[in-house]
Amino acid sequence: MKELSLAMTDQPVALISAGASGIGLACARALAEAGHRVLTLDIDAEAIAQFQNEFGEGSAVVCDMSDAAQVEAAFHSLVDPYQRVDVLFNNAGIAGPQQPVEDIEVAAWQSTIDTDLNSVFYLTRLVIPLMKSQRSGLILNMSSSAGRHGCPMRSPYVAAKWAAIGLAQTWAMELGPWNIRVNALCPGSVGGERIDRVIDRDAAERGMTPDEIRKVYQRQSSLRDFVSPEDIAAMVCFLAGPGGRMISGQTLGIDGHTESLANWLDP
């Protein structure tokens, strides 16, 4: 296992929520390759152990991002030794229920909002004082094509992702005078285990096969394909590099051009 110096550092620091697997891990690897020290908060203890094997002891903390007290404790544990954050990627999220709005339980609604939206506030409010003292920084909120277009059967997820865009635009205005840039990323459906679970649930809800539902999802994009985690990581690294210097307040699609998320299967 690598060892990390606990001294303050001139090396840029990237903090990623839910960075120990999937999209977050792809972004962590890309940012590390670009010269950043990467840190993550993640709910998966096994994935955290693997992350620390790759990125060093002290690079990750187990944290439920829906719990404000846990987020604050984990943040200080990770970041206090370095006293800087150059890139914050608010990546934590869950798919939430896939049901007609009238069938959604209040607890399922609240759980999705807590993880997908409230966590963005919980972590960003802690990072901003450091970025203001640096007079620089990049904040990226993970939204979704559903946060731009809406998506049937996904009400709490859409609500959270739509709000993430509004926060990015608002914070870009608030923080711009400190040279802090804020953007929202809007991927389309991302290939991997998570979209497979979404497709399986959708198929079960409709009495169709997963392959039939997968084709519907792929037709939502002009390029007729799913996004890869590496596609998102490439955008994150571009925004964190010199090319992203004047990009702020933007809602950036990484989706092969989403034509519509309207459900073509409904009557």
Image (tube, grey):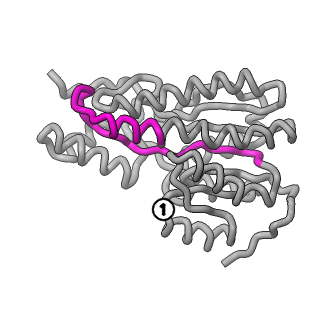
Q: Is residue 86 magenta?
A: yes
**Tally of marks:** 1
| Residue 103 in view in this figure | yes
Mark 1 burial class by Cα count in 10 Å: few <14, some 14-19, many 20+: some
Q: Looking at the picture, how far across and down is residue 12, in whole percent?
A: 80, 52
Give the left or right position of residue 223, taking residue 143 as reference.
left
- From the image, tell me which residue sits under label 1: 44
Q: Residue at x 27, y 45 (%)?
A: 199
Q: Amino acid at mark 1?
A: Asp
Magenta segment boundaries in residue numbering: 85-114
Quarter of image, res 169: top right
Q: Looking at the picture, how far across and down is residue 37, in whole percent?
A: 74, 59
| Residue 25 in view in this figure | no
Q: Is residue 37 above or below residue 121?
A: below
Q: Residue at x 65, y 55 (%)?
A: 73
Direction bottom: furthest residue: 1
Quarter of image, res 81: bottom right
Give the left or right position of residue 229, taking residue 181 as reference.
left
Quarter of image, res 127: top right
Q: Looking at the picture, how far across and down is residue 121, in whole percent?
A: 60, 36
